Image (cartoon, grey):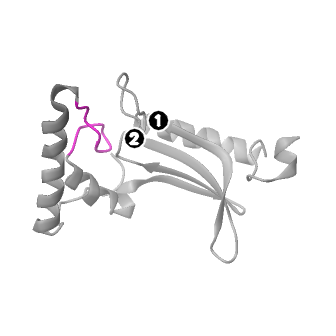
Amino acid sequence: MTGKPWRPSMPEGARKLMDAFDQEMKDKYGAEARERHFDRKGNPISYADWAEAFSDYEYRVVKKTIIGDVEISTVWLGMDHGFRRNGPPIIFETMCFQRSDDGTREDFDFQDRYATEAQALKGHAEAVVAVEADLIKPRGDDEAHD
């Protein structure tokens, strides 16, 4: 695992509320409930543990590459973005952004999501190649829609 390990340090009251929410979902949906939160290795974790880990920038960012004014960012989402009952949880994402001098970012017509960190790193490398080859462009770029 890349990124520094995280340790729970959330206020006890907040952790209790999140744990109560987890239990409420399990009580409501029972056997139909699907785990929703996962660590970077894909292991199920509680909502409170996810919130703690997600607040750690170094844990959340898998890889970031800057090419000129383009930022390729691959992050751990930790929450299953697969939105389906079958298949592994989709917990990583790569996106590209055009950075400006004022600190704002415009996203590209590019986003991909992955189940594993290895897939995310491979997808990141592919996005870097695509940006270097000028194959993806910012949204609204007329050339991108010719």
Question: Relative to 137, is 127 on the left or the right?
Answer: left
Q: Label 1 is placed on what type of residue?
A: Tyr
Residue at the spot x=19%, y=60% of the render? 7
Q: Secondary structure at mark 1?
A: strand
**Magenta residues, start to end:** 33-45
* Marks 2 and 1, the one that precedes in the sequence: 2
Residue at the spot x=12%, y=67% of the render? 13
Residue 69: where, in percent of width, then height? Answer: 71, 63
Q: Label 2 is placed on what type of residue?
A: Ile
Question: Relative to 91, is 69 on the left or the right?
Answer: right
57 is higher (above) or lower (below) than 50: below
Q: Secondary structure at mark 2?
A: loop
63 is higher (above) or lower (below) than 126: below
Look at the image and tell me in which quarter the C terminus lies: top right
Instruction: Look at mark 2 in the image and give the residue it sits on.
Output: 91
Instruction: Look at mark 1 in the image and give the residue it sits on.
Output: 114
84 is higher (above) or lower (below) than 113: above
Residue at the spot x=24%, y=37% of the render? 43
Residue 124: where, in percent of width, then height? Answer: 56, 43
Quadrant for residue 66, please give it. Answer: bottom right
Of 83 and 90, nearer the camera is: 83
Look at the image and tell me in which quarter the N terminus lies: top left
Question: Relative to 7, is 137 on the left or the right?
Answer: right
Quadrant for residue 102, please give it. Answer: bottom right
Of 30 and 46, nearer the camera is: 30
Disc 2 + disc 1, Cβ < 8 Å: yes
Image label count: 2
